[in-house]
Amino acid sequence: MMHSKTPTSLVQSIEFITGFHRKASVMTYLGAPICDGRIKVLYFDEMLTKIRKKLAGWKSSFLSQGGKLIMVRHVLSSMAIYLIAAVSVPITVLQNINRLIAKFFWGSHDGKPKRNWVSWKAICRPVWEGGMGIRNIDAVVTSFRLKGLWNGVVNNSIWASFIRGKYSIDIINLAGYVPPRTASKFWKECTKLISVLVENSAWEVGHGNINFWLENWSNAGILAEMLPGTLHSTSISLREVVEVDFNIPGLTDASTLHVRNLYESRLSAGSDKRLWAWTSNGIFSVKSAFEKIREVSPLCPFARFYWANFVPKKLSVFFWRAINKAIPVDVRIQNCAISLASGCVCCVPRSIESFDHLFLHGNIAAPLWDYFAPPFGIHREDYLDFWDFIWAWFNVSPGGSQMGSLATFIPLAIMWETWRERNHRIHNDHPSGIISIRYKVLNWIQDINPRLKVSRQSPSSIRNVLHTCRITFTSVRRKPIKILRWSQPPPGYFILNTDGSASYSSAAGGGVVRDYHGKIVTAFHRFYGSGTSNLAESRALLDGLGLCMQLGIRRIAVRVDSSLVASWFHYKYDVPWALRRWWHKIRELAQGLDLVVGHVYRELNAPADFMAAMGLSSRSDCNFMSNFPSLLVGLARLDKMGIPYIRLG
């Protein structure tokens, strides 16, 4: 394939030398269309045809909506991924893919698609935000374009070097980069996301060839955003600023001190390296990019109940439709500007068929609720609103208990069987009696009960529930009991216990140093401000080692209740990039100490846990050399006396 304006003589020469003939219009290479000029929609007909054939083979009319959801999530949503990642796909093609999937999910009648009761945008939210967990294809495209930008800017591959050279990319001034007019459409789409890449980057700082103002080299934020309103040169590098000792236009005396502190606390390395801020190893992933790019919606409080693993997908989807007002009862159809005389076929005399009437007060639903609800301590007459009634069911017992799981499942089964019976009567099928419908609900319960994974004890009222539902009791699997006692360190060693504590994004740490006989030598607590539990655990270990170093203690048996921290110390796992600067300091201190680092259960780390909690509650730093807190002294005394701790599991 050659450009349309290539001279004919050159084309003939190449054909003569190679024996290949010129390909007109478009060609397909590894499944992706390659063409001269603008990519047209018709170039993707082959992919759309594959999706249509796949849908025709499934015979969607024989699948429940739960089955359709599984096929959409795991097959249809992935069929276009390769092309999306490789080429620039026209928006019309993406819209056609969404239409095909939506038509499959909602179904069709006589070749015409049925009503889409919920927008595709709402469907493509995560399940915990009220959606169905289908990936939004637009966000997927953006994620792959961001991956293309990352590969071109960050990687050191031959392709990346070629891209940087071809499009004259200046890494230091990346934030202000504008692609040339001759750039491909794919690369132009990638460069639109430069601001997203910069905002979500962190850095390991080596030589400092990083934009001083427009890059997050401190990993605390972009300096131009932290110091708004300052006049500055957007092309100056961190290395150049350090060489003049931060004496540059735009930095006041106060801000200069702040920036120096940021520089001192940087994540240093042998060379400059851009890190992706949303993975622990700093390596870009499409999954993490998708989570940052997608539109976030409010959490759905019902989601964790009706999407539970033990609930069949068709019941989950039906309840999801109910939440989204997608159950076509008469009143809902009237709200769509469709003229319809409403009459509930489940009632004599007939009443207006609203959602609340059919599923709460109707002649089918009401007897079912009145039979199954009282053993749970719930009474239908106490509730006027259907969703308040369902919320009472979902919260009647702790999650993970047999009673809690049944209270989640039974309302879904009742709603399902009520809707089925209503539809049978609408189509003039033989109506079922209330005893027959109750029997169907009991069958659902008896089928699901053996599959429940019970991890918590149910209230005593579970006996009434079991009798009503005609099922057996499922006992909680008991964990083995362990007897734990404090043990002395090796002869000549001191024991350092450290622990971290984090709550509501605030972190603190603490620790205790004891001698061979268990006598407290010193204790401390620190408040670290905003942070995670892993940050608190790591910094508490660092502060504990630093305190021992100040006291001249060199032989230390370190005991932590975080197995992850112990594994990081022994190089079993890679330390997340956000914690590396603290671990660099831990390694430096460890070189001058004789350390034995091990993991202990939390029960044996109670003194350090107490000190960390004190740091979090007081939000202060303190070292104790005497006058130790009385509770700390008591905990140490119990350890010294050999009083056992009881641990389940």
Image (spheres, rainbow, N blue to C red):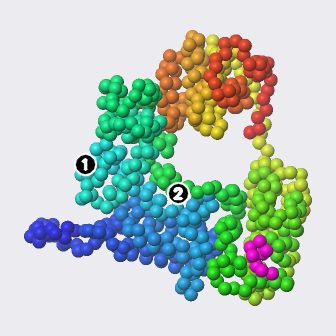
**Residue depicted at x 77% and y 38%:** 648
Q: Which of the image's four quarters has the C terminus?
A: top right
Q: Secondary structure at mark 2?
A: loop
The answer to which image quadrant residue 212 occupies is top left
Q: In front: mark 2 or mark 1?
A: 2
Q: Position of residue 5 (x, y in %)?
A: 16, 69
Q: Secondary structure at mark 1?
A: loop
Q: Residues within 10 Å of mark 2 (few under 14, many from 20)?
A: few
Q: Residue at x 48, y 54 (%)?
A: 293
Among the 4 quarters of the image, the one containing residue 505: top right
Earlier-in-chain disc, 2 versus 1: 1
Task: Determine if residue 499 is in view.
Answer: no
Q: Disc 1 designates what residue?
A: 168
For the point 74% across and 60% down, the residue is 451
Q: Nearer the viewer, residue 127 or 357?
A: 357
Position of 207 relative to 70 (above/below)? above
Q: Amino acid at mark 1?
A: Ser
Which label belongs to residue 295? 2
Is 406 magenta? The answer is no
Residue 354 in the magenta stretch? The answer is yes
Q: Is residue 477 left or right of residue 507?
A: right
Residue 266 vertical placement versus 99 (above, below): above
Q: Which residue of the protein is positioned furthest toward the bottom in this rendering? A: 428
Which stretch did the figure color magenta?
Answer: 351-358
- Give the residue type at disc 2: Glu
